[in-house]
Amino acid sequence: MKILEKHVLSEFMRLLFMALAGFVVLFITVDLFENIDTLIAHEVPPLASFVFFIYKLPFIIGQVSPVAVLVAVLLSLGILSKHGEITAMKAGGVRLLSTVYPLIAAGLAISLAVMLMNEYVTPAAQKKADSFRKQWFGVQDATFGKEGLWVKSDGGILNVRHIDFRKNELFGITYYEVRKPFRVSGRIEASKAVWKEGRWLSEGATAWTFTKEGEARERANQQLALTGLEEPEKLVNLENFQQNMGFFELWEYIRTLEKDGYETTKHWIDLWSKISFPLVNFIMALVGIPFALKTGRHSGIAAGGGLSIIIAFSYWMVYALTRSLGQGGMIPPIVAAFFPDLLFVAIGSLMYGYVRQ
């Protein structure tokens, strides 16, 4: 590696660690203030709180690293430009793009490192954080989106909107009674169900029985049992959230869900995002370099900070849009996960052509 390349890379790495440390501290500070009342109410010792945030550190690093890479690229080249080093390189006949290629290689290396961390370190650390949360706070509640949570049991299929683990209660319930061979024999709708005497009992329920001929007969409102469902804490396996799984673990989990007849579109998007999102580190370096070379020579550090916000926000908007389209079934899950990456690679490539002019 040439001296100029080493100089550019060292400046980038210095700013990368500073940006990464800054974003991690900011993330933890916001999280701490959001949870400070809970920590105090449960009398969590300061050392235990510190350990809790250490467990969350791998997840936080994975989330903020793309922005840190982008900021480091833009600011490092902006500083070199402000000090006249970019101009000196051009005057000396040095090809700027060949000098900054180590930054692209560094972005790729960071992507691979984050990918490995998300596979082998983050899931274990998140499970430790969940165990800490259960130990000190208890399992409290879980709220699900407009589609609710679908749970299959021996006696039927349950859809629930909210679970209060403290009171062992379910809210917003639709329960389909299923008989073999697979036939829906009844439906129960209830605003609430309570765990009593080893079973779930619905309150204020309206129920229908479906005959083999397809006729629906309404049953009298009463307290009805939802048969075959797990006890409260086993109803939702909190350790099976996607961020607590590695790529291959989630792959097997999705296959199991599909065998049981569950909708898995969102899970497939989460799976492919475990590859596409770490690659954003590489893409931010790829996109940031040509922008920095074009604007840094005029605006220096100020442009770097502004461009970081614009580029990161633009990527997030595209990511949110394609994810929504994917969850709605309008585009395949793999397209939803990788389209933002491909779009910004194309933008970066076009900018490289512009820089060469």
Image (cartoon, helix red, strand yellow):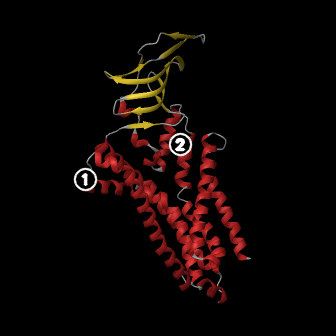
Q: Nearer the viewer, mark 2 or mark 1?
A: 1
Identified by mark 2, the residue type is His
Q: Position of residue 207 (x, y in %)?
A: 50, 15
Considering every residue shown, the one lying at the far right of the view is 357
Q: Residue at x 65, y 62 (%)?
A: 345
- Residue visible at 48% across and 70% down? 16
Expressed as whole percent of the image width and height from the top left, the position of residue 328 reads 62, 39
> Circle 1 is placed at which residue position?
45
At x 48% / y 73%, what residue is drawn?
Answer: 15
Q: Residues within 10 Å of mark 1 (few under 14, many from 20)?
A: few
Residue 160 against residue 270 in the figure, above or below:
above
Q: Position of residue 347 (x, y in %)?
A: 68, 63
Q: Which residue is mark 2?
A: 267
Q: Is residue 132 left or right of residue 268?
A: left
Q: In this picture, is 59 found above or below 263?
A: below
Left or right of residue 148, residue 141 in this image = left
Residue displayed at 60% across by 52% down: 319
CA distance for labels 2 and 1: 36 Å
Query: What percent of the width, then of the height, locates residue 322?
Result: 63, 48
User: Which residue is at the far bottom?
Assistant: 92
Which mark sits nearer the N-terminus, 2 or 1?
Answer: 1
Q: How packed is label 2: few (under 14 Cα within 10 Å), some, or many (20 or more)?
A: some
Q: Nearer the viewer, residue 312 or 341?
A: 312
**Type of amino acid under label 1:** Pro
Q: Quadrant of the C terminus?
A: bottom right
